[in-house]
Image (spheres, grey):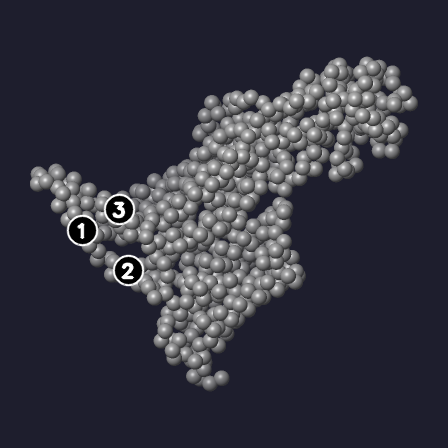
Amino acid sequence: MTAARAAGAQEHGAPVAPRPAAARRGAGAAVLSSGRLLRLELRHNAMLWLLPVAFALFFYNGYREIMALPPMWNLRAMTMQNRLLLDLLIPATGAAAWMGSREGRRRITDLVAVTARPRWSRQLAVWAATTAWAELACLACIAVVYLVTARQASWGSPLWWPAVVSAAGVPALTAIGFAAGAWFPGRFVTPLVTVVMFFGLAFSTQAASGDHSYWQISPLTVGAFDIGAAPGVASFYPYLPDLSIAQVMFTVGLTVAILGGLGIPVARMRWLAAVITVAGLAAAGTAVALAGTGRLDPHGMIVIPALHDAASDQPLRYTPACSRTPIPVCVNPAYAGFLPAVTATVGPELTEFAGLPGAPARLSQVPLVYRQVSANGIDVSASGPRAAAFVVPDQVPGWLGTTGAEFAAQLAEGLGVTLASDVILGGGQKSAAAPTQAELAVIAGSVRFPPSVQSRDLAPMYGQLLPQPGSPADLAGRRFAALSPAARHAWLAEHLTALRAGRVSLAQMP
Amino acid sequence: MTAVAVRLVRLHAASRRLPVALALLAVCAAGLRGVLYGHWDDYGALQLPLIFETACAAIIAVTAGSPFGEPERATGRWLPYLRLGTAVTLTGLASGALAAAGTGMPLAGGFPDILRNVAGLTGIGLLCATLLGGPLAWTGPLAYLVAGVYGLYTDWHPPALSTPWIWPARPPHDVGGALCAAVVFAAGLAAITLRGAREHPSGDGPG
């Protein structure tokens, strides 16, 4: 009836025209009636009623976790990709299965079989309406996260690929749910297919192993499985879209294949549906194969050679954020929020060493280097071995529950010790000879370790960069630490050359 | 028990698709057994049983829907007892089946965990059946699944959720979590016994 009314409406406004115009009018009427059918389905869709559930789940599970992260675009966008689809899965898949099973559940299959529209067309309208509401929920969640992050982030711009992957995953969820409901209409199908989908998606990342895993195709996977959303990824280099492209290709191919499969039982369109299904499966299969060719690049992202654009390997340009300390500390502007914590941790050392021979003129942050060493083992190291080119650890405050004290401890163990040893031992200018006890005492007295640092954390450095606990050098170091930074600076300015030459004994230390 | 009573129980069970529900509970138990043979990390080991417990609870909740509506309410004097018996029996069978599936396997939490989670999730499902109707009763347990999985996740990534209302994240012998699950189960049983599943005048719900 809707189609007939639509056609009638068209006829009232159309002039008398020869045959081609009539054909155009018919096509226009079909589009108009499809639009009306879609509007009807939008108004009577279960997903509309489940939108509050979707928003509540995202707020509870995803949003709070994302907003607890430091305001860095890479962290928040990548975490959002990891969470959003899982939060939307229950309402989206459930609503789609519910809508897909409608004709069978209400036993009206025969009744609607005699309508003008083929079953496939009707089903696609219902699926499209369900997907539209689910997609709206997805985009609303993305918009909220990105808007809040835009107000908080110190630098950078939105990463769109994680959002695209999430948005592309929604139609796949609804297609699977809808097809299950349509093929097996029954009261138990909706919860069962939803649970199965939750299991499949949530645990799809469990099988991922290394950078060559085919399971990286899961739309929840963001970059390397054992890194995921880390501050060091996509901060110094652009976010690589290689894996995202493969994931979008997979979800779109899967959606097309399933929707095509729905049309195979329709006699008139069997071949068309079969071709669409095969094309979708080919796209999805190709995407899986591409994901298996991935490798971890030094910047912590997955490179897929067939999809890789070499232009993406160029570092991002930025003006560093620098501190006003005796030795300026400069970090990537995305890390500007952590600069006060960095300077607070190594501030006494900066005052103590500023202007001494061998002391760096400024400390500049450099990117971390990631390297796949075993199945899911990834080595994260510094690209610069000297304090002048230091790294900020990935465990920044707020990331996976890391506290400010833990961050300060890592900085003291890394940057603090490196800076002190560079200045006291002369950096690369000195031979590989073992440091003297006085040198170790001065290093120990210069670095302020937070109380949370335990002896076992420092054990690898004993004898190399720090004195053994309880040794005379350790006691001399404690005496040296009791001085003010200015007093330590004055003593070092007078004795550093002699100290490096090994002419200062522990007894001569203040 | 008289032949009439037996027939009444049989007909009630048939109207609620209990044979299919029992078969699906068995499939869930078999599925749990199957996945326990796999190698899972700590997340997986703790979260997997919750997924199967949720599936069982959703199945039990969906059986609460009546295909007859008002006529059954008007004539069925024993209906509240049948509803109560069905819910309690299925919950017991689901817990037993899942526990049996985990026998001899590294099942996180063991039987106390299963009993608490299945009972609590079933209570949520029965409350949803009362509010939304039997066919949509799955929404509650499945939405709670996401909350439960997140609660277990926060055990590794603080701050951990400490509220006993997210009982899957609590240790198996935690009294607070068990009490909350028991309260929800009791509320669900009371609601489904006294009121039954909601019936939509326009059919079986939105859509």
Pick whichever of labels 3 and 1 is earlier in the sequence. Answer: 1
Q: Which residue is mark 1?
A: A5
Q: Residue furthest bottom?
A: B2
Find numbered disc 2 in the image and state the secondary structure of the residue it sits on: helix
Q: Is residue B197 above or below residue A420?
A: below
Q: Amino acid at mark 1?
A: Arg
Examine the image and state in which quarter residue A210 appears.
top right
Can I make out residue B108 in this image?
no
Q: Residue A66: percent from the left, percent from the top?
A: 54, 41
Q: Which residue is mark 3?
A: A35
Q: CA distance from mark 3 to mark 1?
A: 13 Å
Q: CA distance from mark 2 to mark 1?
A: 23 Å
Find numbered disc 3 in the image and state the secondary structure of the residue it sits on: helix
The mark found on residue A109 in the picture is 2
Callout in the foreground (3, 2): 3
Callout in the foreground (2, 1): 1
